[in-house]
Image (cartoon, rainbow, N blue to C red):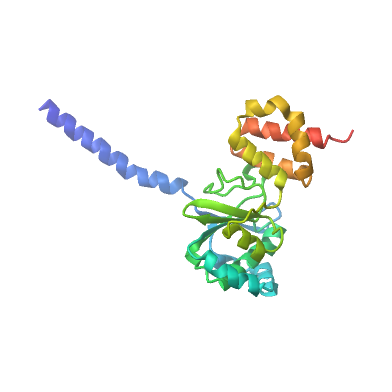
């Protein structure tokens, strides 16, 4: 009898926990938000479709930049079959001038090349200190999104390459290099070098020769802002040791004015 009662109690406990779990998940799962910045301007965060950007107030810059862009049709025609079966993840900010300019152009090229909407994931990130380059669902985690827009080209869950902030040559030519298997290095080579280094070595190893590392990355950097942005996203991801290394390099290469 005791065994039967124990069995009933256990079943009840399992059923109760199961019934509560969906409610808890629903409360904490936020795919997208529309908020106001400190100046009262609307800001989109999280996963949205391009249709939202085609509506007011975002349509002011979306429609203008989409229509104004002239596609390099010769390169795009060659690119079209290479994009078949690929997936595209675009990180951007509605508050970001580069995103406002480049993302409508990206979509125009993908539209021209016949890429279906289901193959494009659009994720909008924040600009505030506490949520710097982060989205509500944290899709950016582990992807080193330190500048936006950031267009990632995926093939079977593997990243083939990315265009960071703006193209090196043109969107069409850069995409052609990425999907064509040619060597392609996006903007911000200094941060890119550090990203690869952090994958290969532990912070304790890197700290052994920071002056040497500073000399190596100096010609690759666009300025102190590149290191500052990268350190900021590392801090947001809880990578304190790596963030400290980047900030030390910034101080060594761009010492504060006295």
Residue 150: name its quadrant. Answer: bottom right
Q: Position of residue 92 (x, y in %)?
A: 63, 56
User: Does residue 52 lie above or below 22 as drawn?
Assistant: below
Q: Residue at x 57, y 46 (%)?
A: 143
The correct choice, above or below, for 195 with respect to 240 in the image is: below
As rendered, which of 110 and 8 lies closer to the eye? 110
Which residue is at a point 41% across and 46% down the rendered structure image? 25
Residue 165: percent from the left, percent from the top? 68, 55
Q: Residue furthest left?
A: 1
**x, y percent for residue 123:** 56, 55
In the rendered view, would you say 146 is above or below 154?
above
Specify the quadrant that holds the N terminus: top left
Quadrant of the rendered structure where residue 255 is?
Answer: top right
Q: Is residue 60 left or right of residue 115?
A: right
Q: Image quadrant for the C terminus?
A: top right
Q: Is residue 34 visible?
A: no
Pinpoint residue 147: horizontal percent, then vertical percent: 67, 50
């Amino acid at each position: 009898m005791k065994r039967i009662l124990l069995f009933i109690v256990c079943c009840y406990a399992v059923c109760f926990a199961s019934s509560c779990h969906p409610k808890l998940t629903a409360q904490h799962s936020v795919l997208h938000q529309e908020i106001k910045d400190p100046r009262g301007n609307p800001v989109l965060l999280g996963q949205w479709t391009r249709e939202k950007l085609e509506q007011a107030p975002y349509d002011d810059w979306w429609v203008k930049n989409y229509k104004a862009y002239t596609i390099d049709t010769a390169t795009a025609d060659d690119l079209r079959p290479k994009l078949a079966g690929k997936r595209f993840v675009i990180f951007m900010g509605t508050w970001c001038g580069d995103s406002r300019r480049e993302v409508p152009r990206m979509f125009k090229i993908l539209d021209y090349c016949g890429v279906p909407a289901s193959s494009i994931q659009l994720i909008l990130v924040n600009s505030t200190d506490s949520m710097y380059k982060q989205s509500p669902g944290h899709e950016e985690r582990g992807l080193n999104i330190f500048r936006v827009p950031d267009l990632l080209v995926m093939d079977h869950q593997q990243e083939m390459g990315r265009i960071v902030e703006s193209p090196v040559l043109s969107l069409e030519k850069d995409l052609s290099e990425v999907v064509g298997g040619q060597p392609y290095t996006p903007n911000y080579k200094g941060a890119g070098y550090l990203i690869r280094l952090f994958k290969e070595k532990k912070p304790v190893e890197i700290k052994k020769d920071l002056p040497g590392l500073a000399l190596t990355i100096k010609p690759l950097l666009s300025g102190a802002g590149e290191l500052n942005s990268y350190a900021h996203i590392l801090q947001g991801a809880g990578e304190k040791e790596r963030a400290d290394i980047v900030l030390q390099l910034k101080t060594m290469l761009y010492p504060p004015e006295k």
